[in-house]
Amino acid sequence: MMNPAPKIITTAPALFHSPCRSRRVLIICAAGLAALASVATALAADDYPTKAIKVVVPVQPGFTTDAVARIVAEKLQMKLGKPVVVENRAGGAGGNVGTEAVARSTPDGYTLLVASPGPLAINKYLYPKLAFDPTEFVPISLLASAVNVLVVRADSPIRSVRDLITYAKANPGKLSYASGGAGTTQHLATELLKSQGGNLDIFHVPYKGSAPAMQGFLQGQGDIMFAELGSTLPHIKSGKLRAIAVGGTTRNQAVPDVPTMSETLPGFVTTAWYGLVAPPKTPPAIAAMLSSAVAEIVKDPDVNARLRNMNLQPAGSTPAELATLVREEGDRWGKVIRAAKITVE
């Protein structure tokens, strides 16, 4: 006699048959997974680093951002005992290509970004479609800052910010300014000057980069220009350019006789800075550890001297301090961008 055929169960088990029980189990499972992820993250932070760290710089070699990244990376490698490799990911506009690559990276502390104000604080106001949200990066530390300086050529009759404002008002449309491109701090600083000076009519001559802009300016293109003090100082000392104001909150020891912009236009500040950040969702413990390491690195006499020789101010900050700087800079330049109706495709 043959055994009867086994019964085939055509209904789902009760666990999945009851919507309420299913939802309860899913919530419990999700909570468990979250707890496991939290434990794994804590363990990863405790062991960090166990392999090479990549520092992405979203500009070509030779720029200040790149130089700062390499100085810090060299010492970070010595301190952590693991390779720290700098990778230049230029391309696109405004440093967005390299920045996007880091934003999409695994948030484990092994891919970092060194960037200037553009990618971190300004570009979100300029580009209608960014492939990343700069506010989601995990801040680590401010590395260094630089003062911008307003210069004219030596043969210019303009000798002060007041002279510039007076001449521009008397001769609307006759002055022009050079910059490294739309949306750069050079561009935005001059737009701020135009606004605070009384809606001055000064024409913009944009270049593809600060170096070409300075070369063009030295050759007679543009009447005024904002530029980093470090790269401009040799031309000031040689007598080719005249500094009429610095953008910091106080006078700079490299050019002690040059007044600040705020001495004529109260509240006017324009500086460049370089920050270290990690991809979104990077564990805070890793960010804090790296921040502490960087703070010690920039105090190193060798690093301090190398940065100051570039006319940079060594920094080293907490993640919270860098977050505050990024937010304040974004708010300030965002207002300038909206007022001047600046857009970049």
Image (tube, rainbow, N blue to C red):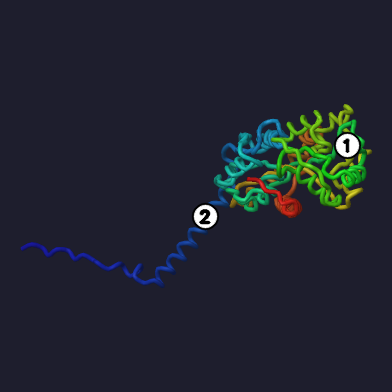
Which is more foreground, mark 2 or mark 1? 1
Residue 341 visible to the viewer: yes
Q: Looking at the picture, how far across and down is residue 196, in whole percent?
A: 84, 51
**Residue that lies at the very extreme toward the top in this rendered image:** 238
Q: Looking at the picture, how far across and down is residue 34, in whole percent?
A: 51, 59
Spatial CA span between label 2 and label 1: 55 Å
Q: Is residue 196 left or right of residue 213?
A: right
The numbered dot on residue 50 is none
Residue situated in front as seen by the camera: 161 or 136: 161
Q: What secondary structure is found at the residue carrying circle 2?
A: helix
Looking at the image, how many numbered discs can be counted on the residues?
A: 2
Which quarter of the picture shows residue 232? top right
Residue situated in front as seen by the camera: 157 or 310: 157
N-terminal of the pair, mark 2 or mark 1, is 2
Q: Amino acid at mark 2?
A: Ala
Q: Residues within 10 Å of mark 2 (few under 14, many from 20)?
A: few
Q: Quadrant of the N terminus?
A: bottom left
Q: Quadrant of the C terminus?
A: top right
Residue 312 visible to the viewer: no
The numbered dot on residue 243 is 1
Q: Looking at the picture, how far across and down is residue 234, in whole percent?
A: 84, 29
Which quarter of the picture shows residue 61? top right
Q: Amino acid at mark 1?
A: Ala
Residue located at (57% from left, 40% from top): 50
Residue located at (64% from left, 50% from top): 134
Check the image and report above or below for 34 versus 146: below
Which residue is disc 2 drawn over? Answer: 37
Residue located at (88% from left, 40% from top): 252
Check the image and report above or below for 222 versus 319: above
Q: Is residue 315 left or right of residue 165?
A: left
Residue located at (17% from left, 63% from top): 6
**Residue that lies at the very extreme toward the right in this rendered image:** 257
